[in-house]
Image (cartoon, helix red, strand yellow):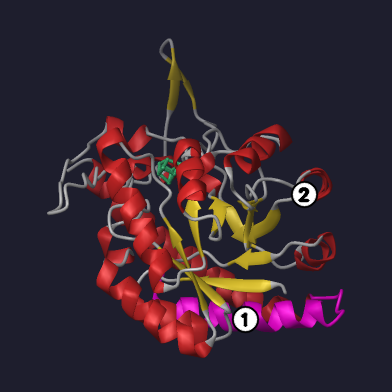
Amino acid sequence: MTVLMGPGGTLDMAITALERGCESVFVGPKGWSRRPASDELCDEEIRELLDWSRPRGKDIRVAINVMPEPAEIPQMLAKIERYAEWGAGGVMLCDPGCIALVRRLLPEIDIHVSVTAGIFNFRDIAFYEEMGANIVVIPYRWGVQELEEIRDKTNMKLEAFMFQATKRGRICPGRCYSSSYFQIVHNRDEQGKDHHIGSASRGGSCYRICRAKWDLKIDERLYPEAPDLKATPELLLWELPEYVALGVDRFKIPGRERSPGLVGDLCAFYRRALDHVLAGGVDVSALAPEWNEIRERWVRERGRRDDGRIANAAE
Ligand code: SF4
């Protein structure tokens, strides 16, 4: 079965995504999933969502895609064990050692290799498979050729983002610590987890430094056409028939930091688009006008979010 998965930045957003066509939703626990606390859920909310989802046949995945410090590992494993007991179908991880530990602890749970693992090639994927992962989130800068290679050379299920970079950037998602050079705030919660505000890789939100306007200066010479630090991904439409034909198992809609209204419309749009393609449709051009409108809303909201976060870096 091909699964459409939506974002759950809040409990309301998660339920909206499930009601508007997604079979699955991913959420992040506060301090463990690279987003501001406002776009993550506390454990009580995750439990509430799982209780809501179970009788409706919906599936919840939990993103714990940060690099834990040694003392945080037992806490991380205890959380994952709890989510599995409550009925979560899978977890998204990026730390190879933790993937091996979780597989030993929970042989049945799905383990997704998060895009933040920074995979570069087919051998990396084979490594994560040996560690115990069974689903790989395809880096959104990859194309069809790379997807064919993973499909044919590993047993991993494929999960594709509904967005893709149209050109390459200079920094790798998931391996970026640039915001922490500007400012990092250590904020330990009552369980002892450091939220590392300013370092997404350690759990806290970053300051979106890659989205700021930069001047490149080398030996007093200014290069006005400085390259983008990070490629800007675009919402995907035209590639959908090809992805389905390639055997992509799960489609992931990003947007935990967007408004619930936009997320709901996005989920409903992609539900229709995916159903059209799964029914054999190869021409998606009739969906383009609505897609363009949603893309514009997406870019507007992204701009507002980035500007606010960049401003926080300098505070
Ligand atoms: S600065 Fe950009 S690339 Fe780095 S963690 Fe933040 S969003 Fe990702």
Q: Residue 108: percent from the left, percent from the top?
A: 56, 60
Q: Is residue 289 left or right of residue 148?
A: left
- What span is colored magenta in the figure? 256-284
Marks 1 and 2, how far apart at CA? 24 Å
Residue furthest left in the image: 190
Helix or strand or loop: what does disc 2 sit on?
helix
**Residue 230 — which label?**
none
Q: Quadrant of ligand 1?
A: top left
Q: Would you call the spot at circle 1 few (<14 residues within 10 Å), some (14-19), or many (20 or more)?
A: some
Quadrant of the rendered image containing residue 274: bottom right
Q: Is 72 rendered above or below residue 7?
A: above
Disc 1 vs disc 2: Cβ atoms closer than 8 Å?
A: no
**Residue 147 — which label?**
2
Q: Which residue is mark 1?
A: 269
Q: Is 50 rendered above or below residue 203?
A: below
Q: Which callout, 1 or 2, points at the residue further toward the start of the chain?
A: 2
Quadrant of the rendered image containing residue 163: bottom right
Residue type, mark 2 in image: Leu
Q: Residue 204: percent from the left, percent from the top?
A: 29, 48
Residue type, mark 1 in image: Phe
Q: Would you call the spot at circle 2 few (<14 residues within 10 Å), some (14-19), or many (20 or more)?
A: many
